Amino acid sequence: MAFRKVGAVILLVSNMDKSIKFYKDTLGLPLKRKSKDWTEFFKDGTVVALHPAKKKSMVGSGAGMLVGFMVTDMDATVKELKAKKVKFFKKPKEESFGKHAIIEDPDGHLISIAEIKTELEEGFDMLGMFGTD
């Protein structure tokens, strides 16, 4: 398996504008990029990312935060995870930014894994992230 690094800590938020203001103005985090559905803080290394929650029940619960890992070979990683009986919350899928899946740890915490094909223009397209596959 080729987990390279933690690429993002992803917070699901109920109000994107309010959350951006809090992290940028109140906490003083440096803004990297901003769009309607994805905002990143910190210019280098691991980012803190904000994404609108599809359901209010996801905000403030354990499901309201994900750790996002970058992987070098999604197909090999998925094969190994399946062999180890890891539960997939979102099956591997080709997205605009590369390949993406979400797995669950033993307590149900969500872990995003992504193989990024190029530098992101608009950030992750994760609107369908919590849909059923």
Image (cartoon, helix red, strand yellow):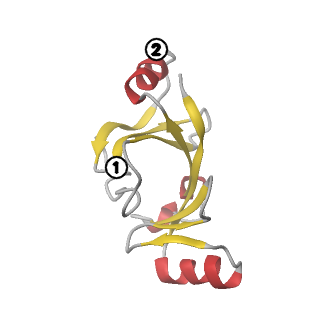
Q: Residue furthest top?
A: 83
Left or right, 43 with respect to 56, comes to right
Report the residue at 56% width, 40% height from top: 108
Residues tagged 2 and 1 counted as in contact (Cβ below 8 A): no
Q: Is residue 62 above or below residue 6?
A: below
Relative image position of residue 64 (x, y in whole percent): 55, 58
Q: Is residue 116 above or below residue 57?
A: above
Q: Is residue 4 above or below residue 112?
A: above
Q: Amino acid at mark 1?
A: Phe
Q: Residue at x 65, y 85 (%)?
A: 25
Q: Nearer the viewer, residue 37 or 42?
A: 42
Report the Cα–Cα distance between label 2 and label 1.
26 Å
Q: Position of residue 114 (x, y in %)?
A: 44, 41
Location of residue 9 in the rendering, given as x and y in whole percent from the top left corner: 59, 54
Indicate which disc, 2 or 1, sits on the residue closer to the N terminus: 2
Residue situated in front as seen by the camera: 122 or 95: 122
Helix, strand or loop at label 2? It is helix
Residue in front for this viewpoint, 74 or 14 = 74
Mark 2 vs mark 1: in front: 1
Kindly identify which numbered label has been placed on residue 125.
none
**Residue at x 58%, y 34% (from the top left corner):** 4
Number of the label disc, if any, that sits on residue 83: 2
Q: Which residue is mark 1?
A: 97
Q: Residues within 10 Å of mark 2 (few under 14, many from 20)?
A: few
Residue 29 percent coordinates (x, y): 66, 73
Figure quadrant of residue 123: bottom left
Q: Residue at x 47, y 29 (%)?
A: 87
Tell me if 47 is positioned left or right of 101 in this view. Answer: right
Q: Is 57 situated left or right of 124 in this image?
A: right
The amino acid on which the numbered mark 2 sits, given as a three-letter code, is Ala
Q: Secondary structure at mark 1?
A: loop
Give the crowd class for mark 1: few <14, some 14-19, many >=20 residues within 10 Å. Answer: some
